[in-house]
Image: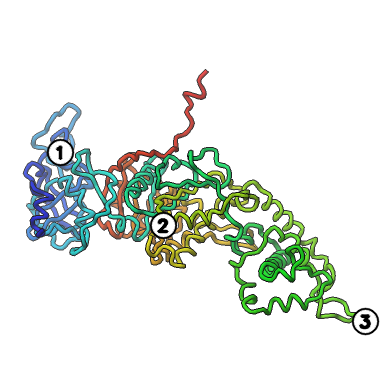
């Protein structure tokens, strides 16, 4: 089908309809143009082909009929000259000769032949050029009209929302544009962020997708079907009907996780803990040199241990922070590390370098560390890690990747905040997914990991002054996961708590109402495609209304998100029901 016939099929009635005429240009500048409104005095908009048009309302998309091409813009201001200000009062129904002026922000250019939309102004309009309201079906097709020429027709489209109540204004977006360069869903409480997330997931489930959802609060437990799997860590208050308990093996933790978790302090505890972990790795690799899983050192010979360390393939693994060890033996092994490096020889005053000495007395300096290790290992917060007999979550993830499942929801609401448990557990899951991606597990089956309440997990540092660790797994996914088939979608109500470096990696932002100035400033800095004129609309978006911005959306598009069928269970308490006498 030729380009012209496609246009005729998509817009059979044309774009510049006389019924949608608004006015003519009266002023032109580099950033914006002004126009005289034809229907400024009308007390209401107009309905045309099933849709409502403001014909000059703030926020409305308009088309300017230039001499060379069409220009796409958005009305950002309507005002009267000072001399005409008193022409409007509460009693007027229509002031025919009202002299109103509107300001249009220029967004992009529209090719006359193909209607291809590009950001920027190819040719500025002239005074007297006519201005029309942009048809809703044209605005709804902006995502496809901004596609590079020659792209094949898309068969996988996510139908997210609409420009207007008219059916022809539904907006569909390719998953490559939504997730291809990562995605962030932002918005204050009550703005519709959770609905948007649920709607996106529902649309993805219509296709052969792979989505892993880290559900921080359990509000997405309403998803069901043969392609959906629910797992939970800990003991959530509310679970999905078919949710199964799982455990996160300690083998997923690396050295920095344990150091940040146990927080060794001072100049003694840190070195002793690292030495103990190294010894426990050796005990795991060469069990013959261990006694009950630990390396005995107090007044013990070194020969067998040194020989074990020098075995082929062992030496490199001893200092590998990802090499597993038995964390339950850590306290006992720290006691064994508190020894003199050399024992006493047979002759008084001599040293025996072939064995360790006796207790050096440093155990007393490590008692607080041992107490914290014991508290963490026995804490209910980490029951899903250290004291659970449930099957491993890592095996469940591997099974999800290998079989025909589309959504894997991992509920974290049962993991407490004590000892930073929730942040650490989420970071460990993220790092496991990144390691799978680096190993090539997602090359033929791309995975999108959705992180709910992402401000709790990104940009965090845990540990004390002597043991600081950054929870950077999801930041690394944002920076390098895309090339391995692993993309991330963040949802948060506090964009200011997400590092600017991470937000700048998000190719697409779905922004709901943002009332905080700092949040809007972060979005502006992170996304070069939005300026203050566009961000000024963000505080006034209706619930469920969102602006889609990003590298693949150089022209911000505001849509009303369709309600999801599986609505998030995020309602607060019913005071009328529970407080009634």
Does the rendering let one see residue 515? no
Q: Mark 2: which secondary structure?
A: strand
The spot of residue 74 in percent (x, y) is 21, 49
**Residue at the extreme right of the image, as rendered:** 348
Foreground: 257 or 128? Answer: 257
Q: Mark 3 points at which residue?
A: 347
Q: For residue 170, which quarter of the picture?
A: top left
Q: Residue at x 69, y 76 (%)?
A: 309
Foreground: 381 or 445? Answer: 445
Q: Residue at x 51, y 51 (%)?
A: 456
Q: Are marks 2 and 3 in contact (CB under 8 Å)?
A: no
**Colour approach in the figure:** rainbow
For residue 518, side relative to residue 536 (left or right): right
Q: Residues within 10 Å of mark 2 (few under 14, many from 20)?
A: many
Q: For residue 270, which quarter of the picture?
A: bottom right
Please tell me whether residue 499 is drawn above or below residue 313 in the rendered image.
above
Looking at the image, tell me whether mark 2 or mark 3 is earlier in sequence order. 3
The spot of residue 366 in percent (x, y) is 76, 61
Q: Mark 1 points at which residue?
A: 84
The spot of residue 554 in percent (x, y) is 26, 58
Q: Mark 2 points at which residue?
A: 488
Looking at the image, tell me whether mark 1 or mark 2 is earlier in sequence order. 1
For residue 538, side relative to residue 154 (left or right): right
């Amino acid at each position: 089908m030729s380009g012209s016939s496609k246009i005729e099929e998509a817009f059979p009635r044309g774009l510049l309809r006389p019924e949608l005429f608004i006015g003519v240009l009266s002023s032109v500048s580099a950033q914006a143009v002004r126009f005289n409104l034809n229907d400024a005095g009308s007390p209401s908009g107009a309905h045309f082909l099933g849709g409502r048009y403001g014909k000059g309302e703030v926020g409305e998309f308009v088309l300017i009929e230039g001499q060379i091409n069409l220009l796409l813009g958005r009305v950002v201001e309507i005002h009267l000259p000072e001399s005409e200000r008193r022409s409007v009062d509460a009693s007027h129904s229509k002031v025919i000769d009202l002299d109103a002026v509107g300001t249009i922000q220029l967004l992009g250019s529209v090719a006359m032949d193909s209607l291809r939309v590009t950001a920027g102004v190819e040719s500025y309009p002239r005074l007297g050029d006519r201005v029309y309201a942009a048809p809703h079906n044209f605005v709804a097709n902006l995502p496809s009209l901004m596609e590079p020429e020659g792209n094949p027709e898309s068969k996988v489209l996510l139908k997210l929302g609409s420009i207007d109540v008219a059916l022809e204004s539904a907006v569909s977006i390719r998953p490559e544009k939504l997730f291809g360069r990562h995605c962030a869903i932002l918005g204050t409480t009550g703005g519709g962020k959770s609905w948007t997330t649920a709607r996106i997931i529902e649309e993805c489930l219509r296709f052969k997708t792979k989505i892993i959802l880290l559900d921080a609060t359990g509000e997405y437990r309403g998803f069901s079907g043969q392609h959906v799997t629910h797992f939970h860590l800990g003991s959530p208050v509310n679970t999905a009907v078919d949710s199964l308990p799982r455990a996160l093996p300690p083998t997923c933790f690396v050295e920095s996780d344990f150091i940040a978790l146990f927080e060794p302090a001072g100049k003694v505890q840190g070195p002793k803990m690292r030495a103990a972990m190294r010894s426990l790795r050796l005990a795991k690799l060469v069990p013959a040199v261990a006694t009950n899983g630990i390396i005995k050192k107090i007044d013990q010979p070194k020969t067998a241990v040194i020989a074990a360390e020098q075995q082929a393939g062992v030496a490199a693994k001893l200092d590998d922070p990802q090499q597993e060890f038995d964390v339950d033996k850590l306290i006992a092994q720290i006691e064994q590390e508190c020894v003199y490096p050399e024992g006493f020889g047979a002759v008084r005053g001599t040293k025996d370098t072939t064995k360790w000495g006796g207790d050096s007395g440093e155990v007393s300096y490590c008692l607080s560390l041992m107490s914290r290790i014991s508290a963490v290992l026995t804490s209910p917060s980490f029951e899903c890690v250290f004291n659970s007999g449930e099957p491993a979550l890592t095996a469940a993830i591997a099974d999800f990747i290998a079989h025909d499942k589309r959504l894997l929801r991992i509920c974290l609401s049962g993991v407490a905040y004590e000892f930073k448990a929730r942040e650490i557990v989420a970071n460990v899951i993220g790092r496991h997914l990144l390691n799978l991606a680096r190993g090539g597990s997602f090359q033929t089956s791309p995975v999108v990991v959705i992180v709910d309440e992402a401000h709790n997990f990104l940009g965090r540092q845990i540990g004390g002054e002597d043991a600081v660790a950054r929870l950077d797994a999801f930041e690394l996914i944002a920076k390098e996961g895309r090339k391995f088939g692993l993309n991330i979608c963040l949802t948060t109500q506090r964009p200011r708590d997400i590092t600017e470096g991470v937000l700048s990696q998000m190719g697409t932002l779905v922004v709901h109402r943002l009332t905080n100035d700092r949040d809007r400033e972060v979005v502006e800095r992170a996304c070069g495609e939005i300026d203050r004129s566009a961000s000024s609309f963000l505080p006034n978006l209706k619930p469920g209304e969102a602006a889609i911005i990003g590298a693949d959306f150089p022209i911000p598009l505001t849509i009303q998100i369709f309600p999801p069928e599986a609505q998030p269970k995020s309602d607060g308490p019913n005071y009328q029901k529970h407080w009634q006498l």
